[in-house]
Amino acid sequence: MKNDLPQRDAKDSKKQTEKAGLHPRNRFNTRYDFPQLIACSPALAVFVKPNAYGDDSIDYANPLAVKALNQALLKQAYGLVKWDIPPGYLCPPIPGRSDCIHHLADLIEQRRGPSVRVLDIGMGANCIYPLVGSSEYGWSFVGAEVDPVAWRWAHKIVAANPGVADLIECRLQKSAAHCFRGIIQNGERFDLTLCNPPFHSSAEEAAAGTQRKLRNLGGKNTGLNFGGKANELWCEGGELGFIRRMIEESSEFAGQCGWFTTLVSKSEHLPRLEQALRKVKAAEVKIIYMAQGQKKSRILAWRF
């Protein structure tokens, strides 16, 4: 196949950023109906109050409120009756995670059913990508996690939701230095791999990012870390270093995986990542742009 590394210029960039908004198939691309959500999950009610415009809302700087909203969304949209996270672990935005799954479905031509096998590198205690992907498309998942606490928690969530329990397997990664080694078994094949890598390169950088998030939400420092644990937020080399290591390792499993994909939060990392993909001789590379409100992100996808 031809090495199809995209050439970006200012015109292309503007065209992509104009495509704001969630994926058309995203169940959460309209305003939340809080009365319906409360009827589905009464525990949400205590957190819902009128905002400055008089509309029902929650305090998004309050981790307990965000968790209650997530529980209601997952129950209403997917029938996932039991979902929780241990204190201090990452509480993901459900609409954004769902958006990623829909774009990945487009990448594999919206194939459905358990014959589609997906590997989630770093599924987290929340296990959100396998939960959404198995619910939306019936895909079968292997979720890999290096943190034993997060691995046990994800396993507990899966077991508590019989509708998806047979579709999701949780595997413990014993080496933080690897993504695929120790997880992908001999003779095993995946149609797709996905990853939401740690963004930051140090604990200090991650803490500063948490404080910026709080300020943007208009919240105060409550002493609660709702941004995630160390392995969820930072690693040596940050996002760029993590993905470059993933790209290098992916070449060893070229015959066992269809598309390799990862989220990339910082667009300035793309040129160096494309360089890394040329080095391992990726046959095809795609950049999928996503937007949720003012937040812009992208999926980097490659195959051999």
Image: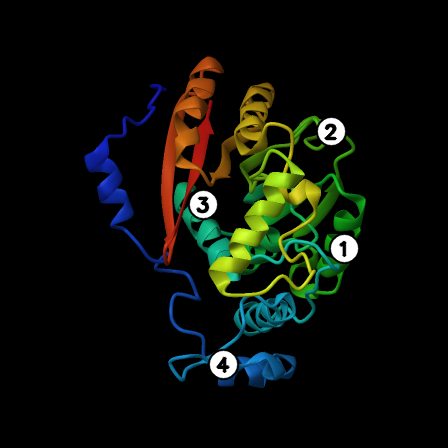
- For marks 4 and 3, give the CA distance: 29 Å
**What label does residue 153 carry, if any?**
1
Evaluate whether residue 121 shows in this view.
no
- For marks 1 and 2, give the CA distance: 20 Å
Question: Is disc 4 placed on a helix, strand or loop?
Answer: helix
- Whichever of labels 2 and 3 marks the residue nearer the N terminus, that label is 3
Coordinates of residue 283 in the picture (x, y in percent): 41, 21
Location of residue 181 with respect to 287 vertically, above or below = above
Location of residue 276 with respect to 134 vertically, above or below = above
- Whichever of labels 1 and 4 marks the residue nearer the N terminus, that label is 4
Observer-nearest of 293 and 153 = 293
Observer-nearest of 157 and 13 = 13
Number of other residues with Cα within 10 Å of mark 3, as a class: few under 14, some 14 to 19, many 20 or more:
many
72 lies left or right of 107: right
Q: At x 54% / y 81%, what residue is drawn?
A: 48
Location of residue 166 with respect to 59 vertically, above or below = above
Number of other residues with Cα within 10 Å of mark 1, as a class: few under 14, some 14 to 19, many 20 or more:
many
Evaluate whether residue 134 shows in this view.
yes
Coordinates of residue 177 in the picture (x, y in percent): 70, 26
- For marks 4 and 2, give the CA distance: 43 Å
Badge nearest the viewer, 1 or 2? 1
**What label does residue 123 carry, if any?**
none
Coordinates of residue 82 in the picture (x, y in percent): 70, 69
Residue 40 in which image quadrant: bottom right
How many callouts does the rendering have?
4
Residue beneath label 3, please?
104
Number of other residues with Cα within 10 Å of mark 2, as a class: few under 14, some 14 to 19, many 20 or more:
few
Residue beneath label 2, please?
182
Question: Is disc 3 placed on a helix, strand or loop?
Answer: helix
